[in-house]
Image (spheres, helix red, strand yellow):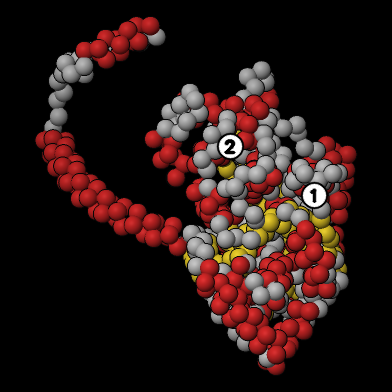
Amino acid sequence: MRAQNRTMWNDFVRYMHDHAGEIIKPVPPLGVWMNLETIGALRNRLHRLVELERELEAFSRMQKSLSDEVDAELKTEEEREEFRPRMPERNIQMKSEMLLTRLEAYQADQSTEQMRKVRAELPLNQFSQDCLKLFENHDVCVLIGATGSGKTTQVPQIILDQYIRAGKGAECNVICTQPRRIAAMSVAKRVAEERNENLRDSVGYIVRWAHAPPAWNGSITFCTTGVLLRQLHNGWKALEGVTHVLIDEVHERDVQIDLLLVLLKRMLEARRQGNPDAPPVKIILMSATIDTTLFRKYFGSGYPNGECPYIEIPGRIYPVDKFYLDDVKTVLSQYPEAAPIFARDVNTAKYLTKETMERKDIDKFMKQEEEEPEESGIDWSRTGSAWEAEDASFKEEASDQPDMMIAYLIAHLCTKKEDGAILVFLPGMREITSLDKIMKSRMFLGQDFTDETRFKVFMLHSSIPAMQQDVFEPLERGRKIILATNIAETSVTIPEVVYVIDTCKHREKRYSQIRRSQALVCTWISQSSARQRAGRAGRVRAGEYYALIFPERHALLATGENAEIKRSDLQSVCLDIRSFGITDPIGQVLEEAIEPPSSLAIRTAINALKSLGALDETETVTPLGSILSQL
């Protein structure tokens, strides 16, 4: 450096002196005596290091080749994920007439009579005219559809069918977002079946690494929230030709949903101000459990009462009997062999002891479950004990899931209850594999879960894509047992499910201020999630819901989900905002969120990005920031 750039060397030396640094002098050689065996070992190691260097060079060349292939594939994938452009005007009328002919044939086809009858009985279709009137008269609205109302499958269809009957079917393109890939794919296939069409005719899906888009102009596209956000990187032109955007399961409030709401709200405001670039897209927010006031006020600009309109659709669901941990203990007490096994199983014994102690001291329990005030950013004034408390809450708790008790409960249902699939909600993949291993390790009440002629065990998790489709296929014989995370909580309907076992836990993202890192931490679900899970049991007939906690704890679960944006690291969100071409200050954009994070959390994230060199002093993304935003 000294020879190549004298100025840089002088600056380096000055910086070292100013910061009490020291330039380390070369270390003189030191003679060491070694025997021949040691010398031979070092020589062999040296030769191996030279070979490794050659191998690394070859690997680097191969990696570059693979990287080029991946880049080419990603480019192809991105092209596939783009919503299709609008067809020429001269062809729109022809397409509209074709869609009308197809709809009339569907309604006259005797083979579709049973499906049409099933659809007509759904509550959503009984309120279809009220919904359509609301959609037509307002740019944005909220639809509350109780579990079993048919909102996810029917709302896009009634919108498209209204356009088709009016002779404008080719002018309608509906985008419906889902929080998860499995929901987008399964709902698209279900809607295509209901319309007696092949997937990709007028109904399709676009998710990461899987694409079956519909024919544009007269279409319903189901996609994940992330896919729609990626399209909006190109600005509002990505929504050209789109008539309706439906945000389903908006109550889940992950970062992507909140960021999408900010962008859509900005689009609506621009349209009201006469911006010609803002597309005339209608926004419909849908959920079974939602704080209507919060969302209506967020989109209330332009309405006299400061709230956008909404409609509430009742559900059609069979009664679901609810049982809690004391009921489960009573049920299993009829089996003499169960009690000693529970006592010997460490996790089950620990779980039951802990839950019983919590139940005895309800005041202490309420204090422990009470949410602490949110602290975002770093508060250096906190004492060591406060830091330790935060660190402890961030750590993954030791797993004391009562696998043995769950296995016995499943066996009890298989022994004593009528046929019907059993859905077990577990926090994550580790707990799923643990329970699966226990179930197949021995016989439970004479039930052999390894016998695939009688039982088919599915593990429903985002990391197992194959089973995400197999689980919907009906079995010729035997009973389904589905071990799932909250991936099966909303939008995913497995008709055979009659019994639900709920650990009342899930994993959610939390950001540690100490570690400056994010992790998935096992924690309790909310009451809204519990209702969604119970609702999985009553779709085809009366069902049963077993919560593996006492009713006192269940009553103290939080009412709704805590917005992810308020408990996450905001650095990636800040970079995402810049990727949408928004030039306003990042803090200003985040403060527009429906429930904005604290200003301290925003400043901390922006300062961290600046220190990394991902943002410059004007909050412009640097080349490094562009790379980081794509990782």
Residue 538 sits above or below residue 451 on the image: above
Kind of residue indicated by mark 1: Cys
Left or right relative to 346: residue 333: right
Few, some or many residues within 10 Å of mark 1 (<14, 14–19, 20+): many
Visible residue check, residue 527: no
Q: Secondary structure at mark 1?
A: loop
Q: Residue furthest left?
A: 36
Kind of residue indicated by mark 2: Asp
Residue at the disc numbered 1: 308
Left or right relative to 62: residue 339: right
What is the x, y in percent for residue 427?
Answer: 65, 55
> Which residue is nearer to you in this view: 47 or 367?
367
Visible residue check, residue 77: yes
Left or right relative to 433: residue 308: right
What is the x, y in percent for residue 78?
Answer: 44, 57
Residue drawn at the location 67% of the way across and 20% of the way down: 383
Residue drawn at the location 44% of the way across and 45% of the way down: 631
What is the x, y in percent for residue 458?
Answer: 60, 71
* Residue 569 marker: 2
Residue 240 sits above or below residue 513 on the image: below
